[in-house]
């Protein structure tokens, strides 16, 4: 056993990917068991879309609550239980939900194989979330036995995380940072919801706020401060906001299934378009004691393909994967560049103010990943969730053994097959 003072500080970041993110649930179960054995210190979690749901459940289980003595709380056991409970509630749990899932998943499959189903594609069947027909359909579902939390992400999150909803988190004693990625629609802000903002360790950054109406007296009154804010180079096309359940829901808002999540004056869609998941913030602070030694990426989307996609099925699948991977790799490449600068200037001012961060990838077995498709990201059956979760546990159990014996690979080589 490594001495506590020598424990490596680890941050784990999970890509989004619909039901494929149940793989990350299995990954987290094994990581949490290793954390229980004090093999490392878990200092950070990050996620986008369904990966954000996994990261949130782990963080919520670990987070202390007000008026609950820490000695009475098995935080790691709670995190594992919360993760399993959430995914058990997220999948279809009764006959009505199984029927709805079979139809929804089936229409996505039909579109992949270019088979018309009642003349509708899944996106047409999903309707416009702003249309009256969509709202009427949602109102109809509880009447046939579909739980509200099955189709309403806000409802599901409120039930899963009541202490966060009721502001009952003991923020002073939260020792694991959580980052959640989302995309602000109107102004095009890359957005991260960050628990360090809740704790006061990071300032809130609302991004560039354009002054649209100078006739508004409140705008004129505050004009000077707004102009000063616009001069701040850190406040342009990105935001750093406090964590909220609404922020997590925003991270998982696919625009053809949910209307944009409104938070304050902003409107948000899935974080797939901006950060999948956010990682740059882990190394952005000047205090090296808060920066992880290693960043583990739970990759839901394969980095490589054997050839050029040509079928409708393969094109849809690869298009979705590229959206998520390319946004992530830009951030990882920046970390690799900082590592290179640290090595080159380690005896100068830059080297003393920055530390290298080892980046590693946890990926599915190639054959298993090849058996999946874009449509299976919408298969909310219990059997498929179990299959994904069990594969995550299997892969991570073997990966952690390699990590302990210094045989685990590093990014970028370990990201491909």
Image: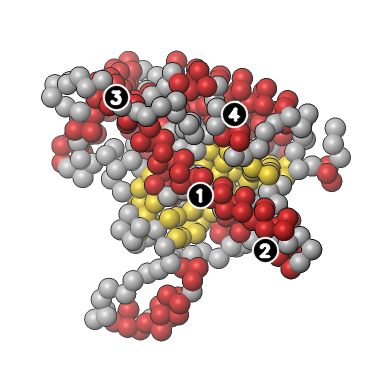
Q: Which dot, 2 or 1, sits closer to the camera?
A: 1
Q: Earlier in the sequence, mark 4 or mark 3?
A: 4
**Mark 2 residue element:** loop
Report if residue 144 is visible in the image: no
Q: What residue is at 76 percent from the left and 60 percent from the top?
A: 346
- Residue 330 is tagged as 1
Residue 149, quarter of picture: top left
Residue at point 59% right, 43% down? 45
Judge whether residue 78 can be spotted in this image.
yes
Kindly report the distance in space between the C-alpha atoms of the residues bearing marks 2 and 4. Answer: 30 Å
Relative height, residue 78 to residue 394 (above, below): below
In depth, the one of 98 and 123 nearer the eye is 123
Query: Circle 3 — which element?
Result: loop
Q: Is residue 157 left or right of residue 313?
A: right
Query: Which quarter of the figure is the C terminus placed in?
Result: top right
Dots 4 and 3: beta carbons under 8 Å?
Answer: no
Q: CA distance from mark 4 to mark 3?
A: 31 Å
Residue at horizontal 20 percent and vertical 40 percent from the top: 128
Between 239 and 196, the one lying in front of the other is: 239
Query: Is the C-beta separation of discs 1 and 4 under 8 Å?
Result: no
Choose top left, top right, bottom left or bottom right for residue 80: top right
Point out residue 260 in the picture as x, y percentages from the top left corner: 31, 48
Q: Which residue is mark 2?
A: 286
Q: Residue at the spot x=86%, y=40% of the render?
A: 3
Q: Residues within 10 Å of mark 3 (few under 14, many from 20)?
A: few
Closer-to-camera residue (378/197)? 378
Q: Which residue is mark 4?
A: 27
* Mark 3 lies on residue: 311
């Amino acid at each position: 056993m490594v001495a506590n003072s020598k424990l490596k500080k680890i941050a784990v970041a999970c890509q989004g990917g619909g039901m494929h993110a149940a793989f990350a649930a299995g990954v987290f179960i094994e990581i949490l068991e290793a954390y229980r054995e004090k093999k490392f210190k878990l200092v950070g979690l990050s996620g986008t879309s369904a990966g954000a749901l996994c990261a949130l459940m782990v963080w919520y289980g670990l987070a202390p609550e007000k008026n609950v003595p820490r000695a009475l709380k098995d935080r790691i056991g709670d995190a594992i239980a919360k993760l399993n409970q959430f995914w058990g509630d997220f999948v279809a749990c009764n006959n009505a939900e199984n029927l709805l899932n079979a139809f929804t998943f089936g229409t996505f499959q039909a579109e992949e194989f270019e088979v018309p189903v009642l003349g509708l594609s899944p996106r047409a069947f999903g309707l416009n979330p702003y249309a009256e027909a969509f709202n009427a359909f949602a109102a109809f579902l509880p009447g046939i036995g579909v739980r509200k939390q099955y189709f309403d992400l806000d409802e599901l999150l409120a039930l899963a995380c009541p202490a966060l909803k009721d502001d009952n988190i003991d923020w002073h004693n939260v020792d694991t940072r959580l980052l959640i990625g989302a995309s602000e629609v109107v102004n095009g802000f890359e957005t991260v919801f960050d628990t360090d903002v809740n704790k006061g360790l990071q300032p809130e950054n609302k991004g560039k706020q354009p002054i649209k109406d100078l006739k508004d007296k409140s705008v004129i009154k505050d004009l000077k401060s707004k102009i000063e804010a616009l001069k701040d180079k850190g406040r342009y096309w990105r935001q750093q906001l406090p964590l909220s359940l609404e922020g997590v829901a925003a991270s998982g808002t696919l625009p053809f299934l949910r209307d944009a999540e409104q938070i304050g004056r902003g409107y948000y869609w899935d974080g797939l378009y901006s950060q999948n998941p956010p990682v740059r913030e882990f190394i952005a602070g000047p205090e090296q004691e808060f920066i992880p030694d290693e960043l583990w990426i739970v990759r839901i989307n394969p980095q490589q393909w054997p050839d050029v996609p040509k079928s409708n099925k393969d094109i849809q699948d690869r298009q979705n994967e590229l959206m998520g991977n390319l946004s992530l790799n830009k951030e990882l490449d920046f970390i690799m560049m900082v590592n290179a600068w640290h090595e080159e200037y380690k005896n100068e001012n830059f080297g003393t103010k920055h530390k290298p961060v080892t980046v590693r990838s946890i990926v599915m077995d190639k054959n298993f990943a090849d058996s999946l498709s874009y449509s299976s990201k919408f298969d909310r059956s219990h059997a498929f969730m179990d299959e994904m979760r069990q594969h995550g546990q299997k892969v991570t159990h073997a990966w952690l053994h390699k990590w302990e014996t210094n045989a685990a690979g590093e990014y970028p080589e370990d990201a491909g097959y």
